Image: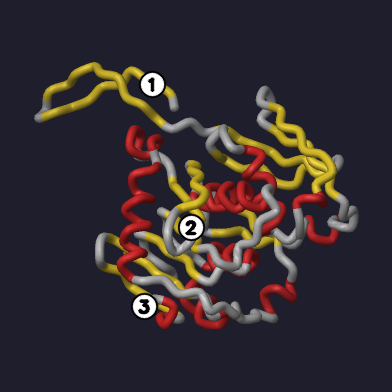
Amino acid sequence: METLTITKIRASVKEETEDVVAQEVPFTIILGDKELVTFLCSPFDLEDLVRGFLFTSGLIKNPDEIKSLSINNQRWSCYVEIANKNVENLIFKRLYTSGCGRGTLFYNVLDIIHRSKIISEFKINSAAVGGLMMDFQKRSEIYLKTGGVHSAALATELEISAFREDIGRHNAIDKVIGCVFSQNKTFEDNILITSGRISSEVVFKAKKCGMPIVISRSAVTNQAVGLAREMDITLIGFARGNRMNIYSKDERVI
């Protein structure tokens, strides 16, 4: 966060005051000797962002495939080496997403054509959803001070186990996934919670992890609903207090 001197108007009266704003940096991942992607992101938890992005983009399958990872905080870049050297064919296979700015999602064509279903017996009580969302809303100190970031969390049916935030909603999701991924944990009994709109690429990220439920306090898109129904992912939007809209696989919410 950064504190700035600004001019504020109240009832047509100007006054000089201080305001706290969220920080933003351009952050580039350099894979081998090639620039892979540049994010506009918040300048913290960057290793989690790199790990989460590489995993959800299908460039790695487990943490051990990252041979080296070095963050340069002066140039806002990351130099990373991975075990799979045959990634050049993925470099130009990109979806430009609906994220904050123009996001990038690398993909395998077969992942999109063959949309396999999530098989999970995971269930959650609707009251527990409300409790998780209440906890989720209280955790973002940066949002409470600036209103300028998105949040993402992974949770069990009982509690939030990991929480991250970023100016970009997809970055926040990759950060929280990267945090858990680095611990070599599985995602199958986890819920993905996001503060932002649930679009198709958010569903793809959840599917990549095998997570059966995605929850947001915000809206969903029609493509997200269509994908979630194909993949048997439970999609919950407008989760606020004791209210929520369930768009797919509602039997997981009891």
Q: In the visual, does 85 lie left or right of 189?
A: right
Q: In the visual, does 201 lie left or right of 8?
A: right
Q: In the visual, does 230 lie left or right of 242?
A: right
Q: Amino acid at mark 1?
A: Thr
For marks 1 and 2, give the CA distance.
Answer: 32 Å
Q: Which residue is mark 1?
A: 3
- Mark positioned earlier in the residue sequence (1 or 2): 1
- Residue sitting at the far right: 85
Q: Which residue is mark 3?
A: 254
> Which tag is nearer the camera, tag 1 or tag 2?
2
Q: Which residue is mark 2?
A: 155
Q: Amino acid at mark 2?
A: Ala
Secondary element at tag 3: loop
Whole-percent x, y for residue 51 in the image: 69, 48
Secondary element at tag 2: strand
Circle 1/circle 2 CB separation < 8 Å: no
